[in-house]
Amino acid sequence: MPFWMAYFGNSLVTIAVALLYRYADFVTLLGGSEFHLGWIVGVGMIGSLLMRFALGSGIDRYGPARVWIGSLAAFALVCFAHLGISSYQGPAIYLLRIALFSAIAGIFGSSITFISGRVSIARMAELVGMLGTSGFMGMVIGAQWGDLLCGTQTVQRWQIDRLFVVCGLLAIGAMWFAWLATRGLPAPSRRRRRAPLLALVRRYQPGTVLVVGIAVGAALALPATFLRTYAAELDIARIGLFFGVYAPTAIITRVATRRMPEQIGLVPMTLIGMAVLSAGDLLFLPVGAEWQFVFPAVGFGISHAILFPTITATGSGAFPVRYRGLGTMVILAAFDAGQLVGAPAAGAIVHFSGLVGLPRYPTLFVTMAVILGAVGIGYALTSRRVAGPLSRRVESRGGRLSWVRSGGGRVEGEGSGVVFRVGR
């Protein structure tokens, strides 16, 4: 029952987040361009990135329930506050974007920590992945709903205001499910001494998978930020079809591959996902009509379904159970860092490539595909020592875990470098 309450609560939130894929319409209505949109989104990620670590410590100290419900309340307030924004140039829109992403960081970080803390590391990738299917369902509903609310050739301010009100109400509804999921959850035990935050991160940091998280975060964020403006350049009014294909593809892929991390290992799964994501970027190039969004949507759906749970399990599994909230936030911070760097860079690529005579969006998609390929090659080369499946957990004491690899040898559960954490 707690899992399903968390599932339904996350579904409502992801519907709201998918509605906010229309944020580009909001910025455009205020007079901004792709360049300004990229900076607004990128600056917003600063708040999320900085809040990840504070939220991670807060989850470990106060428990996921308080952080989860408090973040949902903050999300609702921020959505309602957007009704008073009248310019893209002032600090208000940037501050609200920071607050919005900080709230989203708290919502998903605490819900993932709540779910992952209820199972062994061996099942973490599977359960986090299944929880993530709520996000894909929300993506379908939210994107279609967004087209219904704002899918006209000329979007007016009252349509955008209505969208923000709906998002706020969805967050309020999600608070009820979060309370149902976490009621009766015991408070975390108090410790007299807590290790310094930076010392914990330095001790348990998961190594080069963080670089993978940054690259993947930048790539996966492109449709949510720039698909609307890309579609407008192609004279396509609706983007719901893309997400309507993206999400079911991801759900099917996640269910079909839920056991594969245990069978072939996290590193091979991550590399497969990165290759498919790179192909998905390139499949945007031939798009000329709305129905052709189906092809990149399939690539993004498959890759998202594979990459998020495997990267999350690899990164957060580097931390012992008592610091799992911090570990989850560290790897989610890598995804945020990708958006922090990627959104302004993508906006600049689109803006300046047009000024020098290059095709604007094709240049962006090719650049991202090349970056993913380079990072994937680097990750493969640095991960060869632990690239096979882990077959048997043989020891657990003091938060330190060990596994025997199917090909022989032992992988410890603490330390730095490339960490490989899933076993039977």
Image (spheres, grey):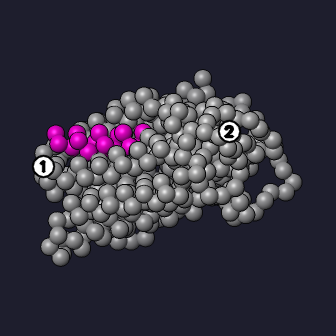
Mark 2: secondary structure:
strand
Q: Closer to the observer: label 2 or label 1?
A: 2
Check if residue 110 falls in the magenta segment.
no
Q: Are marks 2 and 1 in contact (CB under 8 Å)?
A: no
Residue 353, above or below 84: below
Mark 1: secondary structure:
loop
The percent coordinates of residue 172 (x first, y second) are 50, 39
Q: Which residue shows up at 31% across the image and 57% down it?
A: 369
Where residue 368 sits, quadrant-wise, is bottom left
Q: Quadrant of the C terminus?
A: top right
Residue type of the residue flagged with mark 2: Val
The percent coordinates of residue 164 (x first, y second) are 38, 48
Q: Looking at the image, can residue 68 be seen?
A: no
Task: Tally the numbered discs.
Answer: 2
The percent coordinates of residue 185 (x first, y second) are 71, 33
The percent coordinates of residue 209 (x first, y second) are 53, 55
- Residue nearer the viewer, 1 or 299: 299
Q: Which residue shows up at 72% across the image and 30% down it?
A: 184
Q: Quadrant of the N terminus?
A: top right
Residue type of the residue flagged with mark 1: Gly
Main SS type for the magenta part? helix
The residue beneath circle 1 is: 288
Residue 341, above or below 63: below
Q: Which residues are magenta?
A: 291-305
In the rendered structure, find residue 404 and report the number of the disc placed on it. 2
Check if residue 301 falls in the magenta segment.
yes
Q: Is residue 229 left or right of residue 411?
A: left
